[in-house]
Amino acid sequence: MKKYVLISLAVTMVLSANAQNTSSNSEISAPAVSAVPAVPAVPAVSAPNSVQTNQTVKRRPSASHQRMNPSRQPVPSRQPAPAPAPQGVLYPIPVVPDYIAPASKEQVAEIVRVVKKTSFDDDKCDIAKLCVMLRPVFAKDLRSIAKLFSFDSAKVEFLSYAYQFCPDKENYTIVLDALSFSSSKDKIIDLINKHLR
């Protein structure tokens, strides 16, 4: 190890002497400097009996010192705990496109068939809401779906919900034909006016 340090010091001295000669004497060619192979610099290791310099050497505290001074122990880095692994069946997150084409005549006929087959107005309303949320339905088709309900309260609930998904809101007043009472019609008119403001 000492021999390697001495060789690297000698090479460093030769290189620095050549660099000084090159700057002072312009006749020395560049190949003379590059003739010495480059050796990576190795930090000098002082012998145990050598004179100490002014540089302070940081020593790692011993285990017994750390036990005596717990405040000097290194603080572990605080990283957030990993999220717990989900359990059960995982379903993919649905990707909703920016534009969904309105329901075709065949799709509207299928919605009408499914809603008509259901017994109670609450169930009919839930199914119809789900259908118009997944596929926008035109106002004239919403009117035909609303006519399948028995009570105006279910019709108003469905038509109020379906308004946000209707692609032709400018024609939404035609759904008023499906309602029996003027109070129900007033609720839908208020809804339309509220969204127009």
Image (spheres, helix red, strand yellow):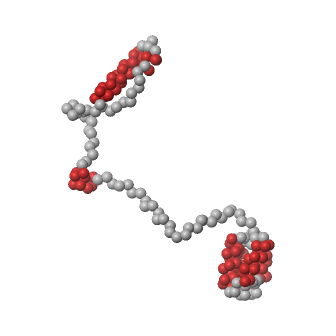
Q: Would you say 145 lies left or right of 96 here?
A: right
Residue at 70%, 74% (x, y): give it. Answer: 131
Q: Position of residue 96 (x, y in %)?
A: 66, 64
Is any atom of residue 194 visible in this view? no
Q: Would you say 154 lies left or right of 173 here?
A: left
Front residue of this view, candidates 172 and 189: 172
Q: Would you say 191 lies left or right of 23 here?
A: right
Residue at 70%, 78% (x, y): give it. Answer: 128
The quadrant of the rendering that contains the N terminus is: top left
Front residue of this view, candidates 15 and 162: 15
* Residue farthest toward the top in the current orientation of the protein: 27
Relative to 55, is 150 above or below?
Answer: below
* Residue farthest toward the left in the current orientation of the protein: 49
Q: Position of residue 149 (x, y in %)?
A: 73, 85
Residue at 36%, 30% (x, y): give it. Answer: 41
Q: Position of residue 118 (x, y in %)?
A: 70, 84
Is any atom of residue 130 visible in this view? yes
> Count the marks: how many?
0
Front residue of this view, candidates 81 and 21: 81
Q: Quadrant of residue 75?
A: bottom left
The quadrant of the rendering that contains the C terminus is: bottom right
Q: Quadrant of residue 116?
A: bottom right
Front residue of this view, candidates 92 and 162: 92
Residue at 66%, 79% (x, y): give it. Answer: 126
